[in-house]
Amino acid sequence: MEVLKGKKCDSCGFYMLEPSFCCPNCGSESLSEYTFQGLGSVYTFTVVHVGFGHLANRTPYILAIVELKEGLKIITIIEDLEITKVQIGLPVKFKRYEEGTGPIFMAV
Ligand SMILES: [Zn+2]
């Protein structure tokens, strides 16, 4: 089972998913590795019908902003869910990290 890894600021507790050299919230360079719980809910979403590049064959797919339990909002693709079933507030969990695309989530 893959885990969702990121960093946490030692000074202010801000979470980040992208590789960072300093905290975007307070500027501190003191960051620790952090493994997210991988749980969250759909904050907002859109259904993509026309994909680009390597995503072209994936349509239709759900592109969502997921708010993690830690409070960080991240852009993800939600798989294993009918596009008519997605809704704001739906609980989701991390499924895997896809190179070139980013984190993939699925319904809980
Ligand atoms: Zn900070």
Image: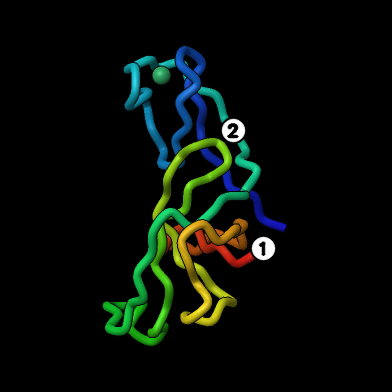
Dot 2 falls on a residue whose secondary structure is: strand
Quadrant of ligand 1 in image: top left
Measure the C-alpha gap from mark 1 to mark 2: 22 Å
> Dividing the image into 4 quarters, which one contains the N terminus?
bottom right
Picture residue at 36% right of the left edge, 75% below the top: 47
Q: How is the image coloured?
A: rainbow
> Dividing the image into 4 quarters, which one contains the C terminus?
bottom right
Picture residue at 47% right of the left edge, 12% below the top: 11
Instruction: Compare residues 55 and 68 and report the one nearer the observer.
Output: 68
Report the residue that reaches farthest toward the right.
1
Q: Quadrant for residue 80, please give it.
A: bottom right
Residue ID for mark 1: 108
Picture residue at 47% right of the left edge, 80% below the top: 83
Give coordinates of residue 8: x percent, y percent.
51, 27
Picture residue at 38% right of the left edge, 84% below the top: 59
Q: Amino acid at mark 2?
A: Tyr
Instruction: Compare residues 30 and 65 and report the one nearer the observer.
Output: 65
